[in-house]
């Protein structure tokens, strides 16, 4: 029998596959088979949105087409029969026409590295196909499943907002009141901010959205759906069979025949298990368009929903139902809707089915606890007939007598209407408000006896606190017959805590937080029901007092808006001079169309091989043996490279390429498997058998390193004044410490490289996503024993780096190059997200200890600080991070007597490395924590103490570098004024006095960020400029484009210097072939240094061509170039900049390490929920001194993006390690970077007018890193809010500050009767699931 054809369309083109592999996902099929590389691999688990495409399906019974976004990485191609797939390439490109979404995303400066952009474009496009004029709620909902690490999201929202219907209303009916009716904080404020900086882009230029221009749904697919007799399709390979029944009878027959096979609709549950947990299903049953699975049946008793409906369809159905039915009948529906709005992202909700969600029974399912308390029933079908079972706690625990039988199919779900005197509520708390699995969730229902507040039925279920959803059945039983009062609540809390127990070593950790949430949710339910009873019978039940009402309101959330104030171009500047103008990113359009080529988008080379790494599973062990035999015997495996193959090239500097006899961290590279495909290499890697013997000591934390004196090199120290004497005159002395957790780079493009041997003279080309081509060139040459001139490294662009594509990238490139050289074939290596996070390390965890002496007025007279960073298992850049931390630790403050010492700790973790800010975000936080504690001790506001200790005029730093702080103080004053600090601080106090369970906090943080790379040699840069005879120019330089727009700025420089239109200047990328001996791109100076080299090359050319130009001043560049050629005058010039003066003498503790300082200040206001630990950033104001901005659009993007990345560092980004040193957080499911829901509701950014001229590039300043630290304004605003809560509860004394301030830390700091009620485990009585490193 011939296998059935798989037929679907991609971008209007018919695709027919005769021998389809059921294990093939849509993402690799698009990228490798169809060469549509615009759709990106970001995480492989549906968590980042980079692979978003749109799928369209025709329904013959309703004659309608449904368009919806999906994650291509989780979509099996076998599920696509009869569908039309649209990718970013299908909606527009530079060769034909751009789609308005693509145009606006690019022109609104919504791209930086551009790697996430195609996914953003497709999420927005799918929304517009369904809603051509979306509301702001629909917009933020559509983008909720897409992550971006560069932009901070605000410009993306601005671009997409141009499609929204303009009403002037924020559409956020807070407390049931429209903003247009609110007056003071209403429409005037919103409309003013909503005029999105007209200078950055002009909406008038945008082409309108024209629905008639979209791709039509293929008529052939309509005919097939209408006319072809339905028949089960079976696709199979050697390993797996995919069965797609198209009628209910066939589905039941297939399930009877293969009872162990899972039924999948969206593959969102089975897919990640297959990919990340190694689960294998030889047979999968995937029903296709079976009408009975999509029924919607509404009766007086309730709603019956087909098990095949997607969660997004369920959301739409329930939204419709709650608007039509009386409120008392829709309690369960409203509770379900509340969770559906935050569950996953739009893509997953459109793929996942209701039935799949229920049957998967994940321990943290948001819907199952609600469906269970709502008395829902499941309609089952098998060959034995129909059956109905309750969706009960027993079903969720998979008790055999309450479960589906293996041959049964879930057809539909009955969700009853609620009754009078019945109340249903939903609760959840996650690390991030949306698109994050719940830490704890709950469904609760109570039914009262008619007319009285006496409990008749009570049902409470929790998710996230056990291996399955857990009920408090016994507790509920004991509470029946009790009146709904505080006494009942107190009893209920104690009963539930006794019944729903968590061991101290429970998986997932956060045990005390989870215990607290269990009863905090119960308290919220108690209040919600009281409020409901008051509505039902106002005379009988009292109103909640105002301060209790706050426990029920959602955190402050209006729609986003921002204002931008940037510098205007001098009126005398020529109109064609682009410097200082908001020029769009050079690759912006290509980012939005998917035409921008990243390393892994490069076409496969003939006979290309794929390399994957085998990494250590132990943190400190001896390698007893490595058995490669089984792996080498597998089909397609070409070789396995070990340290033995490298011989004497196993190390480079302080770094080891492949482990020899010992491993020093989990994730250390042990060997590399080379095979003829990525799949085969990864399968073979699992068959490499390594035997270890654990070694002592195992050092993971900073405290353990201090205890074992495990440091890299000796301490670094800086001192000024006489610290010991100053302590004697201080009014008070305070000691404290703060621990700052690490941070993952989470660049959207994972580590990626392609190495191509040239076949003669040992020449080799390396195409790689790196910040440091020269380092790769050096390490590859050393490994292959070649001279450096035979190794060429090429970088077109990098999909985000943030410091993470230097050291480890070079090691992996060397091993990949060794494999390519050995076999004479091209070798490609691209890490999966989990591998990347495991291997590469991130920002250094940090411990700061301080002893501070101060006067009663807040003046700090003595400060003694110790800094420790967790360097990991090898040196990498840890010593430099500690040095930079010590040099920058003063931030904005003059400490007359200061001693600061630092140590880089050697531990058994992957080496930590550079990450945006390079030590300053940690060191600065230690200082600010110290200043904040001084303010509290003095009874002053932190802002007063900051002001009194701030540098004011010309002064010296603690390492004796002179600078002027005039601009620093100007930024501070301006920020305090712009944010209306005094008025808002008063308003915050008033809010806190009126609300017990919600608190607000405010903080203003100053910034003095020194810019420099520590030595002259590390600041040198070179460039090459060619002018061609047609008058066009080609420029090359040593900087890497990684999203910051350096190539755009370089073209602006050439345009100004040569007075040539930007359109005549081209830049191809960075290569060691054109510009040798380049320094690493980082440290905020890439545009600065390379721009001065480009400027030098242009000036050399102009000087050379000056006689020709002066003879023909009205000529064009084409004329001048031809004349120069005819006169044998060279049209090519090398530019060079030797680097800024930079030095530091650590023996003397003095020097001039920095060229200049970036100044700024940020004010943030937050609101916290004291019962759950949730927080919302209400507003942030940022004032920055940027010198003379070369490109305000790019510079604002850098400030915003850095701020959001810093906000993530200090609030939600939390790395989890096991006590054995294994990293748990290896992808977006476990590690949460900020999403659209996290950005400030209001954001106001202003640049000071141009400051004094300097010897930098056009007096500009580098802004790549400084903004990260301003994210701690959110940290200290949360601290302020928590302090208000603690003061109200009578808790005096400081609480130990740690970063990040996650929901767990916030909730547990807001101590109350619930935190006191929970059981606590004695330290040492259990092994914790995770440890802070």
Image (cartoon, grey):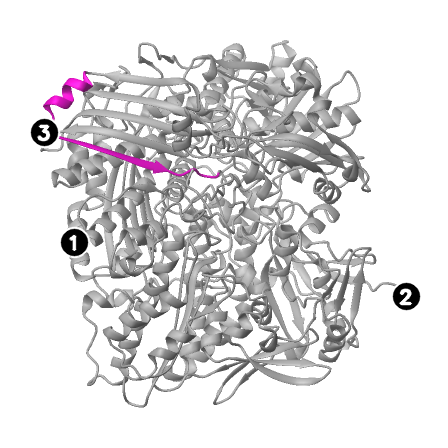
Q: Which numbered tag is attached to residue 731?
A: 3
The foreground one among 295 and 967 is 295
The Cα atoms of the two marked residues, 2 and 1, are separated by: 79 Å
Describe residue 655's horizontal placement relative to residue 626 as left or right.
left
Describe residue 901's horizontal placement relative to residue 1074 as left or right.
left
Magenta residue check for 743: yes
Q: Residue at x 45, y 32 (%)?
A: 915
Describe residue 1145's horizontal placement relative to residue 1279 as left or right.
right
Q: Which numbered tag is attached to residue 1236?
A: none
Circle 2 residue: 1
Q: Measuring from the top left, give residue 526's x and y in whole percent.
A: 30, 72
Q: Residue at x 19, y 16 (%)?
A: 721
Q: Secondary structure at mark 3?
A: loop
Disc 2 crowd, CA 10 A, few/some/many (<14, 14-19, 20+)? few
Badge nearest the viewer, 3 or 2: 3
Circle 1 residue: 1290
Q: Relative to residue 996, is residue 1111 depicted above or below?
A: above
């Amino acid at each position: 029998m011939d296998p059935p054809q798989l037929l679907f369309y991609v971008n209007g083109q018919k695709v027919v596959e005769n021998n389809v592999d059921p294990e093939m996902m849509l993402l690799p099929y698009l990228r490798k088979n169809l060469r549509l590389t615009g759709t990106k691999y970001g995480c492989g688990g549906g968590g980042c949105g980079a692979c978003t495409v749109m799928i369209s399906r025709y329904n013959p019974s309703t004659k309608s087409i449904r368009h919806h976004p999906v994650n291509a990485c989780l979509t099996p191609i076998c599920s696509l029969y009869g569908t039309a797939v649209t990718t970013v390439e299908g909606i527009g490109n530079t060769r034909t026409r751009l789609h308005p979404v693509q145009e606006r995303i690019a022109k609104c400066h919504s791209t930086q590295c551009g790697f996430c952009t195609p996914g953003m474009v497709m999420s927005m496009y799918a929304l517009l196909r369904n809603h051509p004029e979306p509301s702001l709620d629909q917009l933020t909902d559509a983008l909720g499943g897409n992550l971006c690490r560069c932009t901070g999201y605000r410009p993306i929202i601005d671009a997409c907002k141009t499609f929204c219907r303009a009403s002037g209303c924020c559409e956020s009916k807070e407390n049931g009141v429209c903003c247009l009716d609110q007056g003071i904080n209403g429409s005037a404020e919103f409309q003013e901010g909503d005029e999105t900086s007209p200078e950055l882009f002009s909406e008038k230029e945008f082409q309108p959205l024209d629905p008639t221009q979209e791709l039509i749904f293929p008529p052939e697919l309509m005919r097939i759906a209408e006319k072809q007799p339905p028949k089960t399709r079976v696709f199979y390979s050697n390993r797996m069979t995919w069965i797609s029944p198209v009628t209910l009878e066939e589905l039941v027959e297939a399930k009877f025949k293969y009872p162990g096979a899972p039924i999948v609709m969206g593959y969102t549950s089975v897919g990640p298990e297959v990919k990340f947990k190694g689960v294998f299903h030889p047979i999968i049953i995937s029903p296709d368009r079976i009408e009975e699975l999509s029924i919607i049946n509404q009766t007086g008793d309730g709603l019956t929903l087909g098990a095949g409906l997607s969660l997004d369809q369920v959301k739409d159905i329930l939204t419709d139902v709650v608007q039509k039915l009386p409120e008392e009948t829709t309690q369960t529906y409203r509770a379900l809707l509340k969770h559906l709005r935050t569950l996953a992202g739009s893509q997953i909700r459109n793929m996942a089915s209701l039935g799949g969600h229920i049957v998967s029974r994940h321990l943290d399912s948001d819907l199952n606890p609600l469906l269970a308390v709502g008395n829902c029933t499941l309609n089952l079908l098998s060959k034995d007939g129909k059956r109905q079972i309750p969706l009960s706690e027993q079903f969720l625990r998979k008790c055999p007598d309450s479960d589906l039988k293996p041959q049964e199919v879930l057809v539909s779900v009955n969700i009853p209407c609620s009754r009078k005197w019945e109340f249903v509520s939903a609760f959840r708390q996650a690390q991030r408000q949306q698109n994050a699995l719940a830490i704890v969730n709950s469904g609760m229902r109570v039914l009262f006896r008619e007319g009285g507040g006496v409990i008749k039925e009570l049902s409470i279920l929790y998710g996230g606190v056990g291996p399955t959803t857990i009920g408090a059945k016994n507790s509920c039983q004991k509470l029946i017959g009790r009146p709904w009062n505080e006494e009942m609540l107190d009893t209920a809390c104690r009963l539930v805590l006794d019944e729903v127990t968590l061991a101290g070593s429970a998986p997932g950790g956060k045990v005390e937080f989870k215990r607290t949430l269990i009863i905090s949710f119960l308290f919220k339910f108690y209040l919600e029901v009281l409020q409901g009873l008051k509505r039902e019978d106002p005379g009988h039940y009292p109103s909640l007092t105002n301060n209790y009402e706050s426990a029920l309101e959602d955190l402050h959330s209006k729609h986003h808006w921002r204002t931008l104030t940037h510098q205007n171009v001098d009126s005398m500047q020529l109109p064609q001079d682009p410097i200082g103008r908001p020029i769009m990113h050079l690759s912006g359009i290509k980012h939005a169309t998917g035409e921008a080529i990243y390393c892994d988008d490069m076409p496969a080379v003939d006979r290309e091989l794929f390399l994957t790494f085998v990494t250590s599973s132990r943190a400190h062990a001896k390698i007893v043996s490595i058995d490669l035999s089984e792996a080498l015997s597998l089909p397609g495996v070409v070789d396995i490279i070990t340290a033995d193959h490298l011989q004497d090239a196993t190390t480079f500097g302080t770094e080891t390429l492949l482990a020899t006899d010992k491993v020093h961290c989990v994730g250390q590279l042990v060997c590399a498997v080379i095979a003829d495909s990525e799949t085969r290499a990864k399968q073979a890697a699992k068959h490499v058998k390594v035997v270890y013997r654990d070694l002592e000591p195992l050092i993971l934390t900073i405290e353990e390193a201090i205890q074992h004196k495990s440091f890299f090199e000796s301490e670094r120290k800086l001192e000024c004044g006489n610290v010991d004497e100053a302590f004697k005159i201080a009014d008070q002395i305070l000691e404290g410490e703060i621990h700052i957790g690490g941070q993952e780079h989470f660049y959207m493009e994972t580590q990626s490289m392609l190495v191509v041997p040239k076949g003669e003279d040992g020449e080799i080309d390396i195409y790689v996503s790196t910040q440091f081509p020269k380092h790769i060139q050096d390490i590859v040459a050393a490994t292959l024993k070649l001279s450096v001139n035979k190794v060429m490294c090429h970088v077109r662009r990098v999909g985000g780096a943030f410091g993470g594509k230097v050291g480890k990238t070079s090691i992996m490139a060397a091993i990949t190059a060794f494999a390519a050289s050995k076999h004479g074939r091209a070798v490609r290596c691209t890490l999966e997200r989990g591998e990347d996070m495991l291997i590469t390390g991130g920002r250094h965890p940090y411990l700061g200890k301080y002893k501070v002496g101060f006067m009663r007025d807040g003046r700090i007279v003595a400060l003694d600080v110790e800094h420790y960073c967790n360097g990991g298992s090898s040196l990498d850049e840890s010593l430099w991070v500690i040095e930079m931390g010590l040099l920058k630790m003063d931030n904005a403050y003059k400490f007359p007597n200061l001693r600061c010492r630092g140590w880089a700790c050697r531990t058994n973790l992957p080496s930590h490395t550079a990450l945006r800010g390079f030590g300053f975000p940690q060191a600065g936080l230690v200082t600010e924590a110290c200043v904040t504690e001084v303010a509290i001790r003095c009874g002053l506001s932190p802002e007063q103490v900051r002001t009194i200790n701030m540098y004011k005029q010309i002064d010296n730093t603690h390492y004796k570098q002179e600078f002027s702080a005039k601009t620093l103080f100007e930024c501070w004053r301006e920020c305090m004024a712009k944010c209306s600090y005094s008025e808002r601080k008063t308003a915050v106090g008033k809010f806190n006095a009126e609300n017990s369970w919600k608190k607000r906090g405010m903080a203003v943080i100053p910034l003095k960020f020194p810019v420099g790379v520590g030595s002259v040699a590390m600041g040198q840069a070179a460039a090459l400029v060619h002018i061609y005879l047609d008058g066009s120019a080609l420029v090359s330089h040593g900087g890497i484009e990684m999203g910051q727009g350096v190539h755009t700025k370089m073209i602006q420089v050439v345009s100004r210097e040569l007075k040539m239109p930007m359109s005549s200047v081209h830049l191809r990328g960075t290569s060691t072939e054109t510009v040798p001996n380049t320094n690493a791109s980082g440290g905020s100076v890439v545009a600065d240094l390379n721009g001065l080299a480009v400027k030098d090359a242009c000036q050399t050319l102009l000087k050379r061509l000056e006689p020709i130009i002066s003879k023909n001043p009205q000529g064009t560049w084409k004329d001048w170039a031809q004349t120069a050629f005819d006169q044998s005058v060279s049209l090519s010039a090398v530019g060079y900049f030797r680097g800024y003066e930079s030095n530091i003498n650590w023996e003397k503790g003095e020097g001039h390490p920095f060229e200049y300082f970036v100044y700024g200040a940020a004010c943030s206001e937050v609101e916290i929920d004291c019962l759950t630990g949730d927080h919302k950033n209400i507003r942030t104001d940022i004032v920055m001194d940027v010198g003379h901005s070369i490109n305000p659009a790019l510079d604002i993007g850098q400030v915003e993006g850095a701020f959001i990345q810093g906000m993530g560092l200090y609030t939600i980004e939390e790395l989890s390690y096991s006590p054995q040193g294994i990293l748990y957080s290896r992808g977006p499911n476990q590690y949460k970077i900020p999403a659209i829901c996290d950005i400030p509701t209001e954001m106001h950014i202003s640049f000071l007018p141009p400051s004094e001229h300097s010897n930098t590039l056009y007096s500009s300043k580098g802004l790549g890193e400084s903004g990260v630290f301003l994210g701690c304004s959110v940290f200290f605003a949360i601290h302020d809010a928590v302090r208000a809560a603690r003061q109200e509860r009578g808790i005096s004394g400081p609480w130990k500050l740690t970063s990040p301030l996650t929901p767990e830390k916030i909730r547990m700091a807001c101590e109350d009767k619930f935190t006191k009620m929970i059981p606590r485990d004695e330290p040492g009585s259990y092994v914790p699931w995770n440890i802070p490193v």
